[in-house]
Image (tube, grey):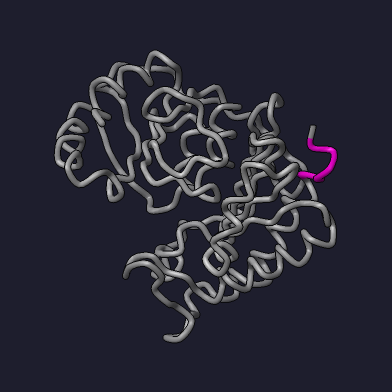
Amino acid sequence: MTATVDVTALADLLRRAAKAEILPRFRRLGRDDVRAKSEATDLVTEADEQAERMIKAEAEQLWPGALFVGEESVAAEPALLGRLADADLAIVVDPVDGTFNFAAGIPAFGVMASIVSGGETIAGIIYDPMGDDWVMAEKGSGAWLRRPDGEARRLRAAEPVALEQMVGMASTGYLPQEKRAEILGNLAKVRFLTNYRCAAHEYRTLAGGHVHYLMYNKLMPWDHLAGTLISQEAGAHAARFDGSSYLPHHLDGGLLIAPDKASWEVLRREVVTV
């Protein structure tokens, strides 16, 4: 299915970009190397821009027919986002996921890429520059933790537990203002709630079987396509808040992920009351 894009080559490209453009800037950013975009907590750094520039240039050489959709490319040319739904083949990249953490010197950030074909996600990669490993999935082939030395370990989502025992992560900042207080109150029903401010590591944590749920409302493709596929290939159930499948062109409608459909339905009924 992914013969037109070599997933291993794309994973290696993410790693090389991280080593060349991201890690040398970690905890070394100057005052002019960090800028706000839509708000004070929505940041872009020289690492984001230079890493995406490198990934895009090499991806266009390796796979010249593919549409390249990067977070910073879309910031410069918003119309790119609208081409994703109809693209025969697209590569979607988040050069630094967790930019707030990166800019603050917190070692919780990642590099993500997904491959979209015919309106569906067929491969996803999340690279951790600090740990130097990938979590990867191709549709129908399971989710895997892979290391540069060739070691590979299959990932499995957590076993289901009762609502009051669930541990997980929710990004509540983009919930509808009129529902935020209610949903935050509902989250008192679970055992534990946290947020890494980094979808890359949140998805890795769920796919590794360490938490029971993830919840998001704002859906930008570079933030969620790779992680959703990886979660599903690890055995989790993922759907928008109305129960419909999450597709690459969706920008709203929320996203809830749980170990299985029954757990998803409990969370949807008891917590995500939108």
Q: Is residue 230 magenta?
A: no
Viewer-side residue, 15 vs 67 = 67
**Which residue sits at x=48%, y=49%?**
220
Quarter of the image with the C terminus in it:
top left
Please give the range of residues in magenta: 2-7
Q: Does the magenta stretch include residue 5?
A: yes
Residue 170 x %, y %: 33, 40
Q: In this view, does 102 lie to the left or right of 113?
A: left
**Which residue sits at x=35%, y=17%?**
265
Kindly indicate the quadrant of the structure image that contains residue 74: bottom right
**Which residue sits at x=57%, y=40%?**
248
Q: Residue furthest top?
A: 262
Kindly indicate the quadrant of the structure image that contains residue 164: top left
Marks counted in the figure total 0
Quarter of the image with the N terminus in it:
top right
Viewer-side residue, 190 vs 216 = 216
Viewer-side residue, 151 vs 187 = 187
Q: In this view, does 262 lie to the left or right of 96?
A: left
Q: Is residue 84 left or right of residue 78?
A: right
**Which residue sits at x=20%, y=47%?**
177
Residue 21 x %, y %: 64, 72
Kindly indicate the quadrant of the structure image that contains residue 132: bottom right
Query: Does residue 121 sit above or below 221 in this rendering?
Result: above
Residue 146 x %, y %: 69, 41
Residue 64 x %, y %: 83, 57
Main SS of the magenta part reads: loop
